[in-house]
Image (cartoon, helix red, strand yellow):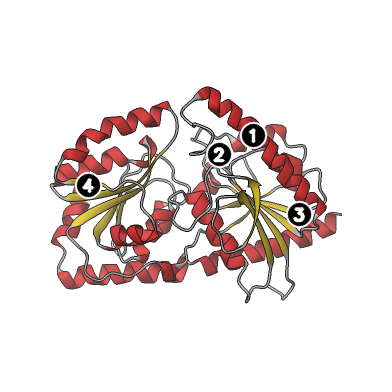
């Protein structure tokens, strides 16, 4: 990219605070993106529009005083959530009004809300949106864009994997940029402990229950960390797996901070990822591999794009429990030298493909092209 420095508005989710240690994928993405773009060597002026209780390295515009979830609104109460939607719309209107008045070069949407995208069409400002979801979620953003936006060519969508592009085939993607992490924040561990791990948002599609059942069937220790999702279904799901927490093989750590995450992943023999949906990327996989921990996963979503089968872990057919158990046994019985090489492969794979520097290099190129295209049309 040339040396032109940009004034960039990153419109974030306001459901949760943006912090380094939050376990949600969108939140971690927004933290990493805004931090790297703000570095002196890149020279951009970056303002992240997020909740006021966020803790970030870039400039922060408090779109709302504090994150909606976990604050004044209960995501498991329908009346409270209806009220939260009104507040969310109010805060996003204020955000977009501020952006319109302050001469930004580009708007980067990184959330799952519709209103700020629609409002953006009122402004003569180039826009991109990183799509964090796939079609088989309760967020029908692709349908909304196709049916409601007055000029679909005006929103420049960025995919986070090839698989996501293919699933959302009814959308026109401008570019694809893989997610990345701050590699130096993850400690490589050569010699792990004797347990396996799982980390993420506890929900049916994330395979939490399956990870527990696989560990019990394989008779291996499993440590889990993360938060529960929202809604009645997820609350009932969490209640259904709590009975396993009393088993000596299963340890539930709750939500973990950055240091605890490093220890959980780095000391793990392997990371279990028995997902049940088309995961658009799977940030936790590269976090585990950055610590040197191989990943065992079902072949869904972007898994084949993130894991090198046999080199940084093992990929199993979706729902193939026997195959998954076989992969756990392979990790258990692998000769020490071969296993150590796999751990080194994991770290190298992330360093070469999934760093925040590579991710932001990609977005800088997207910004440059989108701004140039916008100038030609206006």
Q: Nearer the viewer, residue 178 or 93?
A: 93
Closest to the camera, between mark 1 and mark 4, is: 1
Q: CA distance from mark 2 to mark 3?
A: 28 Å
Label 3 sits on a secondary structure element that is loop
* Label 2 with label 1: CB-CB less than 8 Å: yes
Dot 1 or dot 4: first in sequence order is 1
To which residue does mark 3 refer?
126
**Mark 2 neighbour class, 10 Å CA radius: few under 14, some 14 to 19, many 20 or more:** many
To which residue does mark 4 refer?
251
**Mark 1 neighbour class, 10 Å CA radius: few under 14, some 14 to 19, many 20 or more:** some
Residue displayed at 53% across by 49% down? 17
Residue displayed at 53% across by 61% down? 32
Q: Residue 331: name its quadrant.
A: bottom left
**Mark 4 neighbour class, 10 Å CA radius: few under 14, some 14 to 19, many 20 or more:** some
Residue displayed at 80% across by 56% down? 102
* Label 2 with label 3: CB-CB less than 8 Å: no
To which residue does mark 2 refer?
68
Dot 2 or dot 4: first in sequence order is 2
Residue 281 drawn at (x, y percent): 46, 51
Residue 181 drawn at (x, y percent): 47, 63
Label 1 sits on a secondary structure element that is helix
Dot 3 or dot 1: first in sequence order is 1
Q: Residue 40: name its quadrant.
A: bottom right
**Mark 3 neighbour class, 10 Å CA radius: few under 14, some 14 to 19, many 20 or more:** many
Q: Along the horizontal axis of the image, is 296 left or right of 82?
A: left
Q: CA distance from mark 3 to mark 1?
A: 26 Å
Image quadrant holding the C terminus, namely bottom right
Q: CA distance from mark 2 to mark 1?
A: 9 Å
Extreme top residue here? 79
């Amino acid at each position: 990219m040339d040396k032109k420095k940009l004034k960039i508005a990153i419109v974030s989710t306001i459901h949760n605070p943006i912090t380094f240690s939050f376990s949600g994928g969108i939140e971690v993405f927004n933290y990493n993106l805004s931090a790297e773009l703000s570095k002196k060597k890149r020279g951009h002026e970056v303002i992240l529009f997020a909740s006021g209780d966020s803790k970030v390295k870039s400039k922060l515009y408090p779109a709302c005083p504090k994150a909606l979830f976990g604050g004044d609104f209960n995501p498991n109460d329908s009346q409270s959530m209806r009220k939260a939607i009104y507040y969310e719309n109010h805060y996003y209107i204020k955000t977009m009004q501020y952006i319109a008045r302050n001469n930004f070069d580009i708007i980067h949407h990184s959330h799952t809300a519709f209103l700020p995208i629609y409002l953006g069409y009122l402004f003569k400002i180039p826009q991109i949106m990183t799509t964090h979801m796939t079609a088989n979620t309760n967020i029908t953003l692709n349908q909304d864009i196709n049916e409601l936006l007055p000029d679909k060519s005006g929103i420049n969508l960025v995919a986070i994997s090839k698989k996501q592009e293919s699933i959302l085939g009814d959308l026109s993607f401008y570019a694809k940029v893989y997610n990345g992490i701050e590699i130096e924040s993850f400690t490589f561990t050569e010699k792990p402990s004797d347990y396996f791990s799982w980390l993420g948002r506890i929900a049916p599609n994330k395979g939490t229950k399956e990870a527990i059942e696989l560990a019990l069937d394989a008779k291996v220790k499993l440590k889990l960390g993360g938060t529960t999702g929202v809604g009645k279904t997820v609350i009932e799901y969490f209640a259904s797996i709590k009975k396993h927490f009393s088993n000596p093989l299963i340890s539930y750590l709750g939500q973990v901070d950055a240091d605890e995450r490093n220890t959980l992943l780095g000391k793990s023999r392997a990371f279990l990822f028995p997902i049940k949906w088309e995961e658009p990327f799977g940030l936790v996989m590269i976090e585990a591999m950055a610590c040197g921990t191989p990943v065992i996963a079902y072949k869904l979503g972007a898994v084949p794009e993130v894991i090198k089968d046999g080199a940084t872990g093992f990929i199993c057919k979706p729902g193939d429990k026997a195959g998954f158990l076989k992969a756990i046994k392979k990790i258990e019985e692998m000769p020490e030298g071969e296993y150590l090489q796999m751990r080194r492969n994991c770290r190298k794979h992330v360093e070469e493909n999934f760093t925040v520097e590579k991710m932001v290099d990609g977005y800088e190129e997207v910004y440059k092209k989108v701004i140039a295209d916008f100038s030609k049309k206006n």
